[in-house]
């Protein structure tokens, strides 16, 4: 899938950078453009990709201070500047646009739904969101911001790929080191998903193409991506168990949203040397994925790569009914009910979740 990436906010810019760098290092060519958008100039300065500073008339390059309603307002006012910055990057060869954001801060959580809405209005290709949920220890404001932003993104985006920070940050990670590690892991998963079918090395029996990724994400709502790998034998018959094992690990321990196995659609991608990918293993893994997700729409295919390892990439579409997502939204509701937000023009913070349209944010 040839995609243009737009990172909104601090986390969005860093994740977009990691994705662009991974794609360049691997030589895939799936990322056809990358832009970071922010209200804080200090967050944009160190990024090696193109940048766009918005909100100068309101915050003078100092950020929105975690206020996602101000982030939404600024993006709404300056969205033409962002569209102008993207105009030369979104060409006829682009098959999707991905807006990347951390959902806890002000610029990312408030600005990303506005940008998704405008991009969907202007372009005919799918516009996806890639959202990062804040960790539990990041505070109540971040939980409230993320809950409101996530519900709005679900409405505005063709699909929202989600990453749960709590699941991937190791307990002994420093804050900065933990996020850098998370960004690399996410870049590998999303980068391989985008490259599948576009940057193949060899001819597989059933190579995944862009349409299968788009069809899987066509379930709408929330999506998750998983990954796992193992050393492969030169004899494909000996790799049947290995492929089934990596598929299980990709879903049970490698998903970007853990325990999100109740899916409307799924895509299984077996990556590796075409001579080592076992056909029987692919079919067994696909059947296991059907049973695990309860979905009758499970696609499967190859991603030929020159590698001594065998990997599985799993994309699950329509996971919003999963326990992990419901647990997060309940935590966000509780944080909203317990937090007095003096700078918000509403009497009950929890009321944002009673209104599915979230008119207060957009």
Image: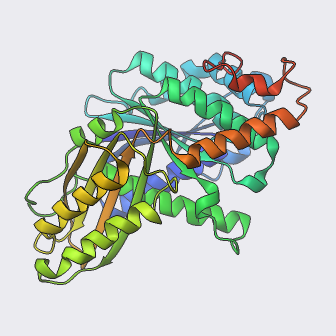
In this view, 188 is above or below 47: below
Residue at image position (50%, 38%) is: 320
* Image quadrant assignment for residue 346: top right
User: Along the horizontal axis of the image, is 352 left or right of 88?
Assistant: right
Relative to the observer, which residue lies in front, 190 or 86? 190
Residue at image position (25%, 71%) is: 243
User: Along the horizontal axis of the image, is 185 left or right of 70?
Assistant: left
Residue at image position (19%, 78%) is: 239
In this view, 304 is above or below 99: below
In this view, 178 is above or below 348: below
Residue 223 coordinates in the image, percent (x, y)? 44, 43
User: Along the horizontal axis of the image, is 80 left or right of 328?
Assistant: left
Specify the color scheme: rainbow
Residue at image position (30%, 68%) is: 311
Q: Quadrant of the C terminus?
A: top right
Q: Quadrant of the N terminus?
A: top left
Q: Disc count in the image?
A: 0
In this view, 44 is above or below 181: above
Relative to the observer, which residue lies in front, 117 or 348? 348
* Image quadrant assignment for residue 271: bottom left
User: Along the horizontal axis of the image, is 340 left or right of 124?
Assistant: right
Residue 129 coordinates in the image, percent (x, y)? 49, 36
């Amino acid at each position: 899938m040839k995609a243009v990436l737009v990172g909104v906010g601090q986390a969005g810019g860093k994740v977009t950078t990691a994705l662009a760098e991974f794609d360049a290092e691997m030589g895939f060519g799936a990322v056809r453009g990358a832009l970071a958008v922010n209200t804080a100039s200090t967050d944009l300065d160190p990024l090696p990709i193109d940048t766009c500073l918005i909100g100068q008339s309101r915050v003078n390059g100092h950020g929105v201070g975690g206020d996602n309603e101000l982030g939404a307002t600024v993006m709404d006012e300056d969205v033409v500047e962002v569209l102008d910055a993207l105009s030369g990057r979104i060409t006829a060869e682009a098959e999707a646009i991905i807006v990347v954001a951390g959902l806890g801060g002000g610029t990312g959580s408030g600005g990303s739904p506005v940008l998704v809405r405008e991009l969907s209005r202007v372009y005919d290709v799918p516009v996806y969101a890639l959202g990062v949920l804040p960790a539990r220890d990041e505070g109540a404001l971040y939980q409230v911001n993320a809950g409101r932003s996530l519900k709005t993104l679900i409405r505005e985006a063709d699909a929202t790929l989600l990453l749960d920070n709590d699941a991937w940050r190791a307990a002994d990670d420093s804050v900065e080191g933990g996020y850098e590690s998370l960004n690399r892991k996410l870049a590998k998963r999303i980068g391989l998903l985008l490259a599948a079918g576009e940057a193949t090395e060899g001819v597989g029996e059933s190579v995944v193409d862009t349409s299968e990724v788009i069809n899987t994400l066509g379930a709408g709502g929330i999506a998750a991506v998983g990954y796992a790998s193992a050393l492969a034998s030169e004899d494909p018959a000996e790799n049947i168990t290995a492929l089934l094992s990596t598929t299980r690990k990709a879903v049970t321990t490698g998903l970007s949203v853990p325990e999100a196995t109740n899916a409307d659609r799924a895509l299984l991608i077996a990556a590796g040397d075409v001579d080592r990918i076992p056909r029987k293993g692919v079919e067994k893994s696909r059947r296991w994925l059907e049973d695990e997700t309860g979905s009758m729409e499970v696609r499967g295919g190859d991603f030929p790569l020159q590698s001594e390892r065998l990997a599985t990439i799993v994309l699950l579409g329509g996971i919003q009914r999963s326990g992990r997502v419901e647990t997060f939204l309940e935590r966000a509701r509780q944080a909203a009910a317990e937090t007095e937000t003096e700078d918000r023009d509403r009497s009950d913070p929890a009321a944002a979740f009673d209104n599915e349209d979230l008119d207060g944010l957009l």
